[in-house]
Amino acid sequence: MLDGKHIILGITGGIAAYKSAMLARLLIKAGAEVQVVMTPSAKEFITPVTMSALTGKPVVSEFFTANTGEWHSHVDLGLWADAMVIAPATACTIGKMANGVADNMLVTTYLSAKAPVFVAPAMDLDMMAHPSTTANIDKLRSYGNHIIEPASGELASHLTGKGRMQEPEVIVAELEKFFAESQSLKGKKVLVTAGPTYEKIDPVRFIGNYSTGKMGYAIAEEAAARGAEVTLVSGPVAIKAKHPAITVIDVESAKQMLAECQAAFPHADIAVMCAAVADYAPAEPADRKIKREKQEIPTITLVKNPDIAATLGAQKKPGQILIGFALETDNEMTNALEKLRRKNLDMIALNSLRTPGAGFGTDTNVLTLIKADGSESQLPLMSKRDAAARLLDAISPAK
Ligand code: PMT
């Protein structure tokens, strides 16, 4: 998986920098081309000579070569890379990365990198547990960076706790897994719905719900990162899709969402219905603002909206995979199973508003994945992006 890949290995100033030599060797053994970028203080822990001898490339550390004035382009480096790995990543560098403090070659390269970035923190347990470190790591995660969680064990301080940089073998395995996954939906077309629908009452009011689109957009991003061509039919949300392989179709009402899904579904290999579709819409939206000054309180007659997932379920062809979500507040499992069957889904992802950290608006979710064959897997609390990854893992051919 790493054969021919261009990897930037960023090394910062921590004791674990000695492990970077082994990491470079393993990456090269796996067929990768490695360019080391070191912070000035990293050179106190491992020499550039060691790293350039191992990688066969001069180490980049300063913006210029002092005696020749040669400029080292962090932009070119960022574009060259298929992945950037920062190992070890100190609390200082993590803080700079999280806040765009571009005062060295490593951070400027990071800010220019278009490729996926992997961060392997290494520090003392109290530094690791400090709220500023955890907030910075969360920020990096929210930028789409991959955090390789440190292990627990004896630290340089002789204290024991979480903060040991992962072993080079583990880091290489993470990279291999990432590149394997990035191919897993190559050539596939994926349809995703996300966000709420707005059902018009009059020109200024609507019936809607609290969906922010975070879960659906995470699924679209993850599918695109795995090589799929993604059509994202989105209700009104404040977030934007990032991956170039995602085509966003903006809609407002359930009827519009249904029309776009029906157009895309015949070409889709996989469809994930994550939108929180309003079940009812005003029968006759007013064409002018309903005035408060009117004597009587207006009655709004509602009609049932189309069920998009059930409509696609009825049209599903052999080989197509249709996944739904169930958002429940009670009788969670019974309701989810009923929806799985009635809508002819292959899998349903149950999330409950009773579970802290799950459902609307949060950056995390807690999903139970239930397949049509009755098998089920309960996922712990995790970021919506990780939950999206586990959901797509569950339908990949190997699972
Ligand atoms: O957007 P976020 O803020 O990140 O929140 C994420 C989420 C809570 C919206 C998401 O995780 C979620 O649960 N989405 C489904 C919400 C929902 O409408 O659940 P439901 O149980 O009412 O619907 C069951 C399934 O049928 C869903 O796949 C839904 O998309 C689909 N449906 C529902 C009604 C309808 N008229 N048409 C549909 O297709």
Image (cartoon, rainbow, N blue to C red):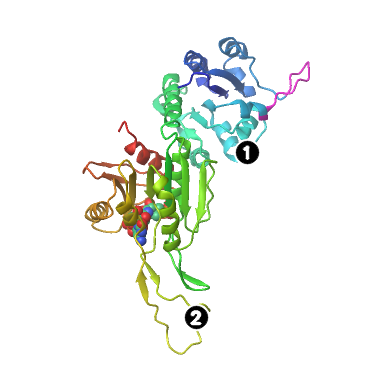
Front position in the image: 71 or 375? 375
Q: Which residues are magenta?
A: 64-75
Residue beneath disc 2? 290
In the picture shown, does residue 364 fall above or below 67?
below
In the rendered image, which residue does mark 1 sit on? 100
Q: CA distance from mark 2 to mark 1?
A: 49 Å
Assess disc 1: are there few (<14), some (14-19) or many (≥20) residues with their C-alpha within 10 Å of its C-alpha. Answer: few
SS at circle 1: loop
Residue type marked 1? Gly
N-term mark: 2 or 1? 1
Q: Secondary structure at mark 2?
A: loop
Q: Amino acid at mark 2?
A: Ile
Q: Is residue 102 left or right of residue 128?
A: right
Whole-percent x, y for residue 255 in the image: 42, 63
**For this rendering, which residue is in front, 297 or 110?**
297
Residue at 43 percent of width and 88 percent of height: 296
- Within the image, what quadrant is residue 219 found in? top left
Which quarter of the image is occupied by the C terminus?
A: top left
Would residue 215 be seen by someone viewing this image from the given angle? no
* Residue that lies at the very extreme toward the right in this rendered image: 68
**Label 2: how many Cα within 10 Å (few below 14, some 14–19, many 20+):** some
In the image, residue 280 lies in the stretch drawn in magenta: no
